[in-house]
Amino acid sequence: MSGRPLPDVSAILGPLLAGVQPRERPLLLAIAERMAAERYRRWASQVETADVRTGLLTCADREDAIAARVEAVYPDASAVQQRLRAAHPDLGAINADIFADRPLAEQFAIQAAGERLGAATWRAVAAATANEAARAAFLACAPLEEASAAFLEGLLARGATT
């Protein structure tokens, strides 16, 4: 372990989300989900244990499924996300900095906490959404987040981070 405290992901992402129109926040979160999918795939390429690799790839697929569900709610998702990326060119750096220079176990712990936060966030977004189909799509994201959190927490509990 690095000995440094784990970052508070909500404190890092909160100001970023606050600067985005409420209607567009789910699409910014979908961008973050795609970044998480990339991170899971990178981790999968670094581990030697087949079941851990498979689990990480399953988590990556869940992240992509979350993003796809959210993007499907918006007919203009691609254009809005392109604009959001242009308005926030530091997204990639913020994402990388959260995990930088940390052992894999700490990265898993940070991601697990982020998945739990994500589940709560999707439920909150759903509660604030009047459109029934959109609300259902957002609510469907929460269990996917929790499944990935549970997988990572299981790895950490058994010390399986290689």
Image: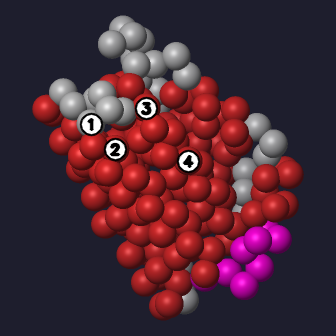
Figure colour scheme = secondary structure
Q: Residue at x 24, y 46 (%)?
A: 51
Residue occupied by mark 3: 46
Q: Quadrant of the N terminus?
A: top left
| First-in-chain label (4 vs 1) | 4
Q: Magenta residues, as a range? A: 73-80
Q: Nearer the viewer, residue 98 or 132?
A: 98
**Mark 1 residue type:** Thr
Q: Are marks 2 and 1 in contact (CB under 8 Å)?
A: yes
Label 1: how many residues lie within 10 Å, few (<14), some (14-19) or many (20+)? few
Q: Nearer the viewer, mark 4 or mark 1?
A: 1
Per the rendering, the mark at residue 53 is: 2
Q: Nearer the viewer, residue 25 or 158?
A: 158
| First-in-chain label (4 vs 3) | 4
**Mark 3 residue type:** Gln
Q: Residue at x 44, y 61 (%)?
A: 61
| First-in-chain label (2 vs 3) | 3
Label 3: how many residues lie within 10 Å, few (<14), some (14-19) or many (20+)? few
Q: Residue at x 43, y 32 (%)?
A: 46
Residue occupied by mark 1: 49
Q: Position of residue 5 (x, y in %)?
A: 40, 17
| First-in-chain label (4 vs 2) | 4
**Mark 4 residue type:** Glu
Residue occupied by mark 4: 38
Q: Residue at x 45, y 38 (%)?
A: 45
Q: Quadrant of residue 34?
A: bottom right
